[in-house]
Image (tube, grey):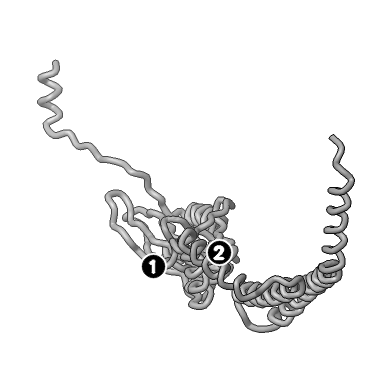
Amino acid sequence: MKIPTDILDRIWLKLADFAVEYGWKLIGAAFILVIGLVVIRWIGKTLQRWLAKREMEPPVRTLIVRVVKLIVFVFTFVIVLEKVGVPIAPLLAGVGVLGLGIGLAMQGVLTNLMAGLLIIFTKPFRVGEYVEVLGVQGVVQNIDLFSTVLTHPDRSRVVIPNRKIIGEILHNCGHTRQLNLSVGVGYGTNLGEALATVRATLAANPRVLKTPEPVVGVSVLADSSIVIAIQPWVKVADHGAAGGELNLAIVEAFRSKRIEIPFPQREVRVFNAGELGAKAA
């Protein structure tokens, strides 16, 4: 189908008028936008380097950089809109109404945001610390505005929405954890020697921290053994390996000193054994 010549002429005239009226404005707006994006990137990098020299939590630095970049971007966007002739006042009113609707529809997201800000500024835990919350545990890998990421001891990642953390009971171990080991010795054992052997074994392991001092003592008088509780502190990264090393070292040390590690056993006594034998015959 062939378009009539007069319609094509009108289209070209409209395009020419638009180019004359808005062409330079669009070019200027595009130039301002490009310059603004370059400035935003430069400000972000410069501010990040400056904040890195200050004593500040990484999430706080990230938040400050993002807020500053967002403010500069909004300022640049307003200038671009004004350059192309868009009325700003009605646009801001429309954005306000739209923001209210989006806020009502995204209450969960905003709750996560507010909880993230509360976590960042109150600092109930920090990156690198070992925490337990909501039945999960791990090393804090990242604290973001909307979620907190933990590294579980099995090397998996646990992502927790920030709104789930606020108001819950939080167990923060910091950068150290306490091992909860135990070993049983016979009732005829010299307890002083056994306790000294355990303490010497702990002192010989480089993963065990000297401060705070390990807790070693008799915890339970069981049926067939005296249970010695062994509770040293280690760094979070050493928690898994230290337990196995200490158990092996304690067993070997007890064997070398002939300290008995009993196993469960029962003593059965038969009364009137002669009468039972006669009846059986």
Amino acid identity at mark 2: Val
Viewer-proximal residue among 97 and 54: 97
Q: Residue at x 50, y 72 (%)?
A: 119
Residue 249 visible, this angle: no
- Residue 80 — which label? none
Count the marks.
Answer: 2
Q: Is residue 95 above or below residue 227?
A: below
Seen at 47% across and 69% down, the residue is 115
User: Label 2, on which residue?
Assistant: 140
Q: With 260 as the anchor, is 73 left or right in this view?
A: right
Q: Where does the image place residue 233, in percent across and percent down from the top left? A: 49, 67
Residue 38, given in percent of the width and then of the height, sits at: 81, 72
Disc with the residue nearer the chain's start (2 vs 1)? 2
Q: Quadrant of residue 129?
A: bottom right
Report the amino acid beneath label 1: Gly
Q: Nearer the viewer, residue 220 or 62?
A: 62
Between the residue at mark 2 and the residue at mark 1, the CA separation in whole angstroms equals 18 Å
| Viewer-nearest of discs 2 and 1 | 1
Query: Which element is circle 1 on?
Result: loop
Q: Residue furthest top?
A: 281
Point 80% across, 71% down: residue: 29
In the displayed structure, would residue 154 be above or below residue 142? above
**Looking at the image, can residue 238 be seen?**
yes
- The image position of residue 190, as x and y in percent, is 37, 61
**Mark 2 nearby-residue class (10 Å; few <14, some 14–19, many ≥20):** many
Quadrant in which the N terminus appears: top right
> Which residue is label 1 attached to?
167
On the image, the x and y values in percent for residue 166 come to 42, 67
Reply above or below: 59 against 50. Answer: above
Answer few, some or many: residues within 10 Å of disc 1's Cα (few below 14, many 20 plus, some between 14 and 19). few
Residue 219 vs residue 175: left or right? left
Residue nearer the viewer, 47 or 257 = 47
